Amino acid sequence: MARTAFTCLTLLVVATAFAACGGGDDPLAGRCTIDESRFRELAATAGTAPRFTWCGAPATALAVRTVAAERDVWRVECTNTVFAPLCIVPGVVYGETPDSTRVTVPAAALQAGTPYRFCLSGVQDVRPPTQCLEFTP
């Protein structure tokens, strides 16, 4: 009898804990993790030297391109795509080369009032798929 009561109480506590964590359609809403297989919540701070942040996954390449011409104005890529293919983590400042990356397109001065696109790419632009965010410094 005591064992049954203990089992029921344990199940009730576990069920209550799971219910408290639920709610909403996205189980990761409000949490920023970097261990997923997708890019989400891309953001760029204001100014001509923005900081780029995101949640979800590290990237293989980060590019900033003009919206009008789709031309890269800065691009960095991981140097070791075999053993560390996803080396770019959030918090990258425009023009500053993250560790374990190489610059493939040197940073050009961003023009205030001109729209740009900040794009993250995964391995072979597929895993995770490329995601972009339009911003205007």
Image: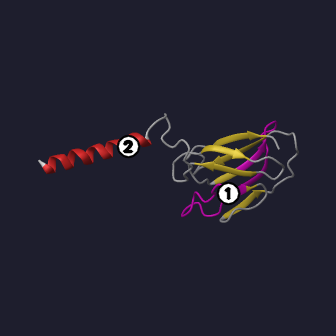
Please identify the quarter of the rendering in which residue 16 is found.
top left
Q: Going by the image, does 1 lie left or right of 48? A: left
Report whether 125 appears left or right of 14.
right
Q: Amino acid at mark 2?
A: Phe
- Residue drawn where x is 70% and y is 62% of the image: 98
Residue 92 locus on image (x, y percent): 71, 56
Give the x, y percent position of residue 83.
54, 64
Rounded to the nearest angstrom, the CA distance separating label 2 from label 1 is 40 Å
Residue 90 image point, x, y percent: 65, 54
Quadrant in the picture for residue 19: top left
Q: Note whether 30 is above or below 79 in the view shown.
A: above
Residue at 65% in and 65% down:
100
Magenta stretch: dominant secondary structure: loop
Q: Which mark is residue 77?
A: 1
**Part of the protein shown in magenta:** 63-92
As helix, strand or loop, the secondary structure at mark 2 comes to helix
Q: Nearer the viewer, residue 19 or 112?
A: 19
> Of tags 2 and 1, which is closer to the observer?
2
Labels in figure, total = 2
Q: Quadrant of the C terminus?
A: top right
Query: Residue under circle 2?
Result: 18
The spot of residue 31 in percent (x, y) is: 54, 47
Q: Callout 1 environment at 10 Å: few (<14), some (14 to 19), or many (20+)?
A: many
